[in-house]
Amino acid sequence: MGWLFLAFGIVAAFGLAALLRRAAMQLAPTEWRSALADMPLTAAFGLMVIAIYIFVASAAPLLAPFPEREVVGSQFQPWSLQHWLGTDRLGRDMASRLIYGARNTVGIAFATTALAFIVGSLLGLWAALRGGWLDQTLSRFVDALMAIPSLIFSLLLLTIFGTSVLTLILVIAAVDATRVYRIARSVAQGIVVMDYIEAARLRGEGSWYLIRREILPNALAPLVAEFGLRFCFVFLTISSLSFLGLGIQPPLADWGSMVRENATLITFGDITPLLPAGAIALLTVAVNFVVDWQLYRASGLKEQAG
Amino acid sequence: MTGEVLLEIRNLVIEGRAGEEWLRILRGVNLTLHRGEVVGLIGESGAGKSTLGLAAMGFARDGCRISAGSIRFDGIDLRMASERVKRGLRGKRIAYVAQSAAASFNPSHKLIDQYAEAPVTHGVMSRAQAEKDAVAIYTRLRLPNPEEIGFRYPHQVSGGQLQRAMTAMAMACRPDLIIFDEPTTALDVTTQIEVLAAIRDAVRAFDTAAIYITHDLAVVAQMADRITILLRGEEVEENDTRAMLAAPRAAYTKTLWAVRRFQRADQPPPREAPLLSVRNVSAAYGKKPVLHDVSFDLYPGRTLAVVGESGSGKSTVARVITGLLPPSEGEITLEGASLPPDYRARTRDQLRQCQMIYQMADTALNPKLTLRQIIGRPAAMYLGLRGRALEARTRALLEMIELDPGSFIDRLPSELSGGQKQRIGIARALAAEPKVIICDEVTSALDQIVQEGILRLLDKLQSELGLAYMFITHDLATVRAIADDVVVMQHGRVVEQGTKAEVFAPPHEPYTELLLSSVPRMDPDWLTNLLAERAATD
């Protein structure tokens, strides 16, 4: 029964995505229509899922039936009308914590990825543009950081600096920025040798203008695609750190620690602890669908055909 | 020619995909080729010459389809033939020589390995035979050290040699038909001669039929027995080479013939002081010296052509002037004042005075910016124009380069043709209101009709604005058309300089003589006579 229900849910979600895509095509401004017209169904599904997550995360206090941190009943209650997904090992409402978890996990993942991208890509583009000793210094420093396995490195840093949400964001962003730096630099190295960059340099343009107006628009497509992938990885890193007890700290709800805290229930055939894991998996898949679509667009196939 | 018919193409229609539609690239073309005959295919870019050349092998590029007509090669219908049959023919009985040999060779295999591949695969020769045979063909194509050259990698031989090695490769199985797709377009004039002579010789010796695709009429006049002219996928005219050269019939053919006749009006000798002077400049890339004691002057309202083969240092001079490569000795002066050697040390006004137009418009324009942004930026930056003044200036610049501002201003470079892109490059240079414009091979990537348009435009702008041009080129026809003064360079030194009349009138320096005599002429006997002459003097 459960499997049938799941299959029906997926088909319904895709159907809804198709409908939404059609509606978006009617309403969108003309210059977006061609982009929407060749948007695959998977991308529409991905966008829809992401939109739902954003909605849930931002409207969490309105949607959740109970507060995030309050003990509202006895421990490990089964699913009921009052507590939709039962309660956890302290007696907090699972459904509410799942909804608040979206806010914490997704919000922190987004902030981390954004920070990693701003720092990593700007430094990468700058290094490619200036070359010479600046490029060498930055690149070798990044190489040194990348030589340390990322999970161990973040564990080390978190142990040193303690685990607050801010240090968590900064540490994971620092580790991820090294990867973004590498990609941004190699993409930009192909761009800075172009004659239009030489022309702009000879015009007397500064580095900031060159990065912003001449290089970034040409490097954007691969960076956007990478953003999606990085977002998934950050997500998984936060969840694994939480699972290890060094990520988002209780009593804040987050999906990784929710799995860990309630893992015992799985032994009794209760699937509730798997739901946060499922929420992570669904978002990861959705983001990757959108990333695939962006990669296709970035490869220039679309532009040539148009 | 009365030989047996080898290839017969009838009413060939080839379509290419553009989004949802199929556009016709060839619209019913006929072509007949006899054994041992060379047919020249001429047309602008986009005329469908290469598509027709590939169709002669029964091949259509990705995204293209053969939708009507017939291709018969020696009794085999190539449209109906299976891939297996066609694979058996290709490389063995029909061979192909591409425009860029450097891009067509696999860089990680030796020349001989790539030579032997076709005969061994098709079972024509054993590997040992093929190696022996390669030496014979390399000798025939006059490659230096024929015994040894096959054991080099593609990057270890020069461009002209590589192009001949590719021709040798095409001849490996002694095919009945070779398709040459612009084999000399990317080469210097002096190298071109060697390749042309070698190809013609080998084709005659083995009695091979050939389709020779080019946009250079003078080249095709040397190579082809008959010429077919294509325009937008349709045949315009077809005749024997001599007959067509003597009396072109179609109006389009006549315009093709007339292209080389653009000639800038003679200028009076310069009266003012030089605008920009290069004084005893030497420069090096790292430790490798590339320029030795180069000096010349640019005058307002005049065009200085810097001529030389690739590697002569002519583009390096431009890099020194713009400040990208600070010279090791000497200096650049602008209106009498010395310019800082590095562009980063120059003032904004000094940068503004000297603008550059690049050879490849594709890489010189940022593909993600609209023309409004590309042209508007220098005007905003140097002249401080904003809002409506900037808009008006951008539109005026588009009008100067003869593009309609209304329909072009918000386009991206990808929505323009090659010639239009080059015009945008000109507009961007003009937007800075410079005194000097350096044109680095600006016409060499364009076909002749478009070239002429660009040259006329540059000439018109020069007489309106009194600009000084420095025109870097290896094409002496362009020099004849547009230059007032000429500097001839070889191995980083100035070999000869003076006004155009002085440089082009005898007596010449030996190198100038070599360059001048290597420019193909529209005379079918030119190559034969030239080779005889050179053989006599050697």
Image (cartoon, grey):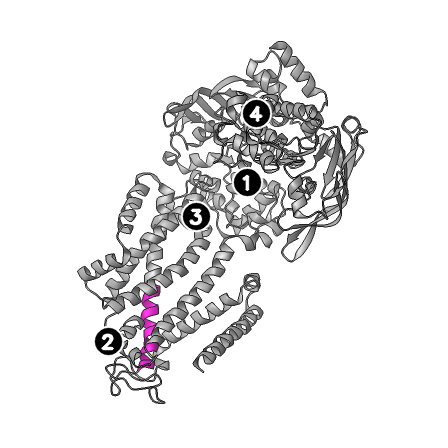
Residue position marked by numbered label 1 in the rendering = B361
Confirm or deny contact between disc 1 and disc 4 (CB under 8 A).
no
Hey, which quadrant is residue B249 in on the image? top right
Of marks 3 and 2, the one in the foreground: 2
Distance from disc 3 to disc 1, alpha carbons, whole Å, reads: 17 Å
- Residue B180 position by quadrant: top right
Please name the residue that numbered disc 2 is placed on. A251
Q: Considering the numbered disc 3 on the image, is that residue within a helix, a strand or a loop?
A: helix
Disc number lying in front (4 or 2): 4
For mark 1, name the chain: B
Q: Is residue B324 inside the magenta stretch?
A: no
Cα separation, mark 4 vs mark 3, equals: 52 Å
Residue B132's disc number: 4
The answer to whether marks 1 and 2 sit on the same chain is no
**Magenta-drawn segment:** A94-110
Circle 4 or circle 3, nearest the eye:
4
Residue position marked by numbered label 3 in the rendering: A215
Badge 1 or badge 4: first in the primary sequence: 4
Q: Can the viewer see residue A158?
A: yes
Single out the residue that lies furthest toward the top. B537
Protein chain holding label 2: A
CB of mark 3 within 8 Å of CB of mark 1?
Answer: no
